[in-house]
Amino acid sequence: MRDKLVTVFGGGGFVGRYVVQALLRTGARVRVAERDPRHAWFLKPLGGLGQMQFVAADVTRSDTVHRAVVGSDMVVNLVGVLEGKFDAVHVVGARNVAEAAAGAGVEAMVHMSAIGADPAAASAYGSSKGRGEEAVRAAFPGAVIMRPSIVFGREDQFLNRFAGMIEKFPVVPVLRAPVKFQPVFAADVGDAFAAALAADHAGRTFELGGPDVMTMGEIIRWLAATLGRSPSIVELPDAAGALLARLPLAPITVDQWQMLQRDNVVAPGADGLAALGVTPTPLASVAPEWLVRFRRLGRFGRRAATKLHV
C-alpha cells in the first residue's frame, strides 16, 4: 500500500475519518473527495508531508467523480444518506463512482453498503443499498462490498443520541426494543477497509459486526447503567411506534421504522472482520471513554460516587 493513491469519497464523514486514518497508517497516499473539501480539512494533520490531497466531488455528478479518480490506484466509496434522495446517492452515485473507477483502470475498489441491503427490502434505504450493490458489481465486478451493522464511535449519531436522551429526560421511550444489532467499532471498520485494499479480495462481500449482539432495549439499559443514570425506560408497543413515526417532527422517519422491523446482525456463515484479520472491539471496552461526558459531574462522577459510598 505504500505510496498507492487511494481516493476516498466521503472521507470527511464519521466512518470516513477512520478509513482515512487506517489508510494513512499503511503508508498510502489519500485523496479525500467531498462536495466541500473544507469539511475534511481537519484530517490534514493526520498525514505526512504530501500524503493528503483534497478534491471537490459530488457522487451524483459523474463529471466531478471522473475528475476525482484521475491518477488513482484504488477507490473507496463511503457516501450514504439515512433519509432523502436514496436512489440519487446509493444507486446513481454508487454507479458513478464504480464506472469512474473502472474507466480509470484502478486496481481495486471498496464500496460501503449495509447489512440488510436488498433490492426487495421494504425500506427505501435497504432497497436502494441493494440496488447500489448491483450497480457497483455491474460497473466494477471486482469491487469489494462492505456491509456493516450499526457503527459506533466517538462522533456517532447512535450511542451519543440515546445517551443525550438518557442524560436529559426522566423517561426514555424505546422503539422496537427486541430488534437486534451487532454494533461495530468505527476504527475496526476503518481497518477492515484498509485490509480489503491491501490484499486481493476482489468480488467478495463482508458483513461487519462487533463481538456483542444486543437488542435495542439492552443497548438503552447498558447506556443508562454506564452513565450512572436511572430513567424510566418504556418499551413502546409496535402500534404506538408505527403511529409515532408518521407524526410531524417524529424522532424517526417511516422508512427508518421499516428498517427496525428486522434484525441488523451478521448473517450466519458470512465473511466478516476475522476474514480480514481484524479483531472486533467490544462496545464496553471503548465507549465509556467518550460517553463519560453524559455522566453527572462528567469524568469526576465515578470518583464522587465512590467517596459518597465510603
Image (cartoon, grey):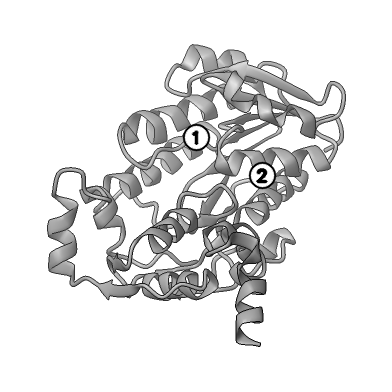
Query: Going 84% across and 21% down the picture, which residue do you hit?
Result: 50
SS category of the residue bearing label 1: loop
Where, quadrant-wise, is the N terminus in this rendering? top right
Q: Residue 263 placed where, x, y %?
A: 37, 68
Q: Visible in this render: residue 142?
A: no
SS category of the residue bearing label 2: helix
Where, quadrant-wise, is the C terminus in this rendering? bottom right
Query: What amino acid is found at the position of numbered circle 1 in the picture?
Result: Val
- What label does residue 18 carry, if any? 2
Q: Closer to the N terminus: mark 1 or mark 2?
A: 2
State the residue in front, 58 or 223: 223
Q: Residue furthest bottom?
A: 310
Name the residue tied to disc 1: 79
Q: Nearer the viewer, mark 1 or mark 2?
A: 2
> For the image shown, how many numbered marks are present on the structure?
2
3D distance between C-alphas at marks 1 and 2: 14 Å
Quadrant location of residue 30?
A: top right
* Image-based side of 137 in relation to 284, left or right: left
Query: Going 33% across and 36% down the picture, which residue do you hit?
Result: 86
Q: Residue 114 placed where, x, y %?
A: 46, 51
- What label does residue 51 carry, if any? none
Query: What amino acid is found at the position of numbered circle 2 in the picture?
Result: Tyr
Disc 1 crowd, CA 10 A, few/some/many (<14, 14-19, 20+): many
Q: Visible in this render: residue 190?
A: yes
Query: Going 41% across and 39% down the picture, which residue do you hit?
Result: 132
Query: Going 34% across and 49% down the picture, which residue do you hit?
Result: 126
State the residue in front, 170 or 259: 170
Question: Label 2 near label 1: C-beta < 8 Å?
Answer: no
